[in-house]
């Protein structure tokens, strides 16, 4: 029987884009807790412990300052996973849940091997009563699997030396605004069966979140709500991106259409920015997972409906790539193209599923020479992303037709003799570029392809640059 006690020690398994910032804010808001963030990746843990806080493994505005305040006081990073599970009253599972790449459900279902490994490790090392919290995004019903693994160790003990409660507490932070999202969340979702454990977690959040924003549901509603929130957000991006193509054909302007429809309070103005397609580690994998679940539960029509959100997203990236080739006379051999932005959105160094990867690869396949710039992504990351891509590797073998790329963090020299500039990420730095000076450096006819509505149309055209702007007729 679970005896209520004060939560003192928290262990978070997974020191990634969610585990790191989430636990940093928790430590900051709850100085009475000791928080241990553990990860198998020793290099990452060393970076989290780095004296020089500019070397943290992730870039997130505001994170460095919080780390300076709490690290070594009540926030600790370690690769000793077992040790910190054993002293924890509450364990957060914050590990990656990517799309399966082989076996049943390959290409759609979630790969839950990390979650299962964690559950087994918690089952082995936990002592006393432990509240296990699903923080990772997982398919509905995953708590059932975790419960079975944990229960199996409960049952094997003759005397109850350990027991578990399982909660679902999905994370809704967006990269680039993670700290603000964590400090001022729209809502906190806690799903569970054991009211006492739910209250323990709720009490922690109530240190800085108004109780009315804390929603309590059953386990399955909580697990499913996370997938559905991402699906709805991604659906809005695909909807406006599909309309961007129609605007280009008709003379309408997608930004004007977004403002006009967003003014309707029933529609709302957020998530209506047309762009090169959504990236990031989650939208695509979570929708694929939703599609898999719908098919699994015998709902192929529902599955097809959501699959189209991804179809439009892939199509947007392909169609932009084709437009660039077409405008540059259908030939990119020996043409120099500057790629502005490699992260999937501004204010993060994350490149997972970034549209820049697909579009860069496409242009390289056409024989272009790319100069890739990003304020926070480094050359090693770009190299990994372009190499890791299977289609890219297959073409790499055919060196005759393949282009070349170089990384440049020098925006002074990057535009020298360039034929085109492609703006793919909405970094504020790119809004301040001096196009008059850039134009002088470029080879003529010079092109700018603006997929993020960053440049001033009139200014660019007056200078003499050819402009193609997503969702408009220029
Ligand atoms: P990530 O890849 O950045 O971090 C996951 C970490 O878990 C890695 O450092 C990995 O080494 C570690 N790990 C994996 N298995 C482990 C094990 N058995 N023991 C110890 N460490 C282990 O992933 P992320 O972006 O932080 O995402 C984590 C989860 O949160 C995913 O389910 C994701 O869908 C969800 N999520 C992500 C975001 C986001 O913005 N990135 C937002 C909300 C939810
Ligand atoms: C998204 C959700 O917003 C978070 O709530 C969620 O927790 C997270 O996924 C997750 O589960 O991982 P994130 O992917 O970090 O967060 O960033 P978003 O701001 O949602 O942007 C996703 C992509 O959509 C980016 O490529 C962005 O450029 C694009 N986007 C977004 C648009 O093209 N237009 C928009 O109007 C908004």
Image (cartoon, rainbow, N blue to C red):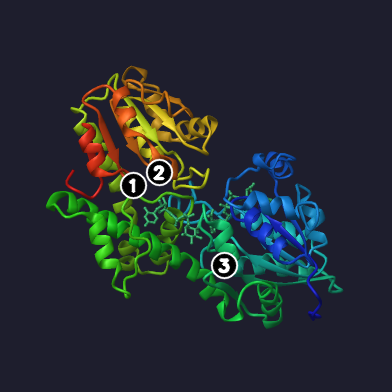
Left or right: 294 with respect to 469? right
Question: Which labelled disc corresponds to residue 452?
Answer: 1
Kindly tell me whether residue 271 is visible in this rendering. yes
Residue pointed to by mark 2:
425
Q: At which x and y percent is residue 144?
A: 60, 70
Image quarter of residue 392:
top left
Q: Nearer the viewer, residue 196 or 449?
A: 449
Image quarter of residue 149:
bottom right
Q: Nearer the viewer, residue 332 or 73?
A: 73
Query: Quick one: quadrant of the C terminus?
Result: top left
Q: At which x and y percent is residue 103?
A: 49, 49
Q: Give the secondary structure at mark 2.
A: loop
Cα separation, mark 3 vs mark 2, equals 25 Å
* CB under 8 Å between discs 3 and 1: no
Q: Give the secondary structure at mark 3.
A: loop
Q: At which x and y percent is residue 274?
A: 31, 53
Q: Mark 2 near ligand 2 (CB under 8 Å)?
A: yes
* CB under 8 Å between discs 3 and 2: no
Kindly tell me whether residue 307 is visible in this rendering. no
Q: Residue at x 72, y 61 (%)?
A: 27
Residue pointed to by mark 3:
184
């Amino acid at each position: 029987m679970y005896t209520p006690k004060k939560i003192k020690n928290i262990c978070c398994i997974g020191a990634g884009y969610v585990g790191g910032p989430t636990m940093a804010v928790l430590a900051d808001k709850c100085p009475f807790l000791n928080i241990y963030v553990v990860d198998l990746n020793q290099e990452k843990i060393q970076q989290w412990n780095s004296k020089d806080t500019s070397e943290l493994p992730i870039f997130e505005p505001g994170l460095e300052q919080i780390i300076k305040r709490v690290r070594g006081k009540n926030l600790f990073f370690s690769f000793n996973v077992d040790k910190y599970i054993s002293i924890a009253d509450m364990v957060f599972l914050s590990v990656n849940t990517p799309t399966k790449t082989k076996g049943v459900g390959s290409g759609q279902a979630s790969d839950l091997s990390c979650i299962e490994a964690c559950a087994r490790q918690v089952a082995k090392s936990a002592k006393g009563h432990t509240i296990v919290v699903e923080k990772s995004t997982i398919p509905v019903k995953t708590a059932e699997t975790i419960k079975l693994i944990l229960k199996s160790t409960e049952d094997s003990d003759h005397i109850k030396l350990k027991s578990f409660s399982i909660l679902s507490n999905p994370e809704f932070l967006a990269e680039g605004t993670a700290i603000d999202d964590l400090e001022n969340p729209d809502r906190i979702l806690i799903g569970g069966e054991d009211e006492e454990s739910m209250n323990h977690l709720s009490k922690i959040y109530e240190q800085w979140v108004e109780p009315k924003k804390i929603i309590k549901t059953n386990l399955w509603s909580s697990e499913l709500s996370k997938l559905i929130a991402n699906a709805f957000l991604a659906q809005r991006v695909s909807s406006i991106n599909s309309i961007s193509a129609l605007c280009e054909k008709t003379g309408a302007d997608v930004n004007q259409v977004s403002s006009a429809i967003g003014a309707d309070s029933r529609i709302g103005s957020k998530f209506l920015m047309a762009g090169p397609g959504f990236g990031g580690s989650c939208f695509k994998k979570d929708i694929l997972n939703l599609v898999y679940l719908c098919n699994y539960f015998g709902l192929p029509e529902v599955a097809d409906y959501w699959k189209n959100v991804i179809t439009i997203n892939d199509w947007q990236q392909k169609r932009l790539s084709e437009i660039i080739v077409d405008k540059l006379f259908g030939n990119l051999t020996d043409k120099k193209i500057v790629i502005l932005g490699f992260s999937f959105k501004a204010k993060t160094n994350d490149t997972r599923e970034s549209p820049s990867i697909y579009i860069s690869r496409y242009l390289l396949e056409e024989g272009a020479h790319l100069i890739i710039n990003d304020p926070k992504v480094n050359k090693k990351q770009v190299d990994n992303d372009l190499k890791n891509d299977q289609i890219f590797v297959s073409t790499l073998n055919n060196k005759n037709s393949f282009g070349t790329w170089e990384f440049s963090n020098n925006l002074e020299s990057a535009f020298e003799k360039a034929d085109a500039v492609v703006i793919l990420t909405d970094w504020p730095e790119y809004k301040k570029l001096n196009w008059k000076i850039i134009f002088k450096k470029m080879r003529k006819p010079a092109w700018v392809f603006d997929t993020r509505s960053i440049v001033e149309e009139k200014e660019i055209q007056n200078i003499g640059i050819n402009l193609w702007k997503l969702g408009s007729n220029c």
